[in-house]
Image (spheres, helix red, strand yellow):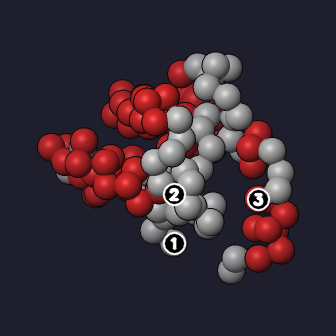
Amino acid sequence: MLDINKLVAQEHTEPSMRGHLGELDPWTEELAIEMARKDGLELTDDHLGIIRYLRDCYADHGGTINARMLVHSLEEEFAGLGGHKFLYNLFPLGPIAQASRYAGLPLPPGTRDPSFGTTH
C-alpha cells in the first residue's frame, strides 16, 4: 500500500536520495549494469538500448516530456520488438520507473507515483 507520508517526504528530497542521479554526467553504462546487478537484474543490449533512448530523450528535451508521452514514445520506438510487452518483459517494475533509475534520470514531470508504469 502506498504510504502518502513517505511519498510527500520523498518529493522534497534531492533526486539522488530517491535513487536517481541528479545530473547526466556522472552516469556510465557500467554504473547502470552494477545498479541492476544489485537489484538482481542482468542488463542486456536490449535493456541498454531502452536506457540510452531515455537518456537521449532527456538530453534532447531537458526533462520536459511527461511520463505519459514518454511511455507512448518508448512503445512506438520499440514497437517492432513487441512494444508494451517487450518493455515490461525487460523492466518488470516499469519501463519508466525502473529504466529511468538505471539511466540515472529523475522521474519525468507529472509522475506523482514513484512506481509509474509498473504492473503492480
Question: Residue 12 location in percent, x, y?
Answer: 82, 56
Question: Residue 96 location in percent, x, y?
Answer: 48, 51
Label 2 to label 3, Cα distance in Å?
20 Å
* Label 2: which secondary element: loop
Mark 3 nearby-residue class (10 Å; few <14, some 14–19, many ≥20):
few
The residue labelled by disc 2 is: 93
The residue labelled by disc 1 is: 120
The residue labelled by disc 3 is: 11
Residue 96's tag is none
Question: Label 3 amino acid?
Answer: Glu
Question: Label 1 amino acid?
Answer: His
Question: Residue 88 location in percent, x, y?
Answer: 38, 55
Mark earlier in primary sequence (3, 1): 3
Question: Residue 89 location in percent, x, y?
Answer: 36, 53
Mark 1 nearby-residue class (10 Å; few <14, some 14–19, many ≥20):
few
Q: How many marks?
A: 3
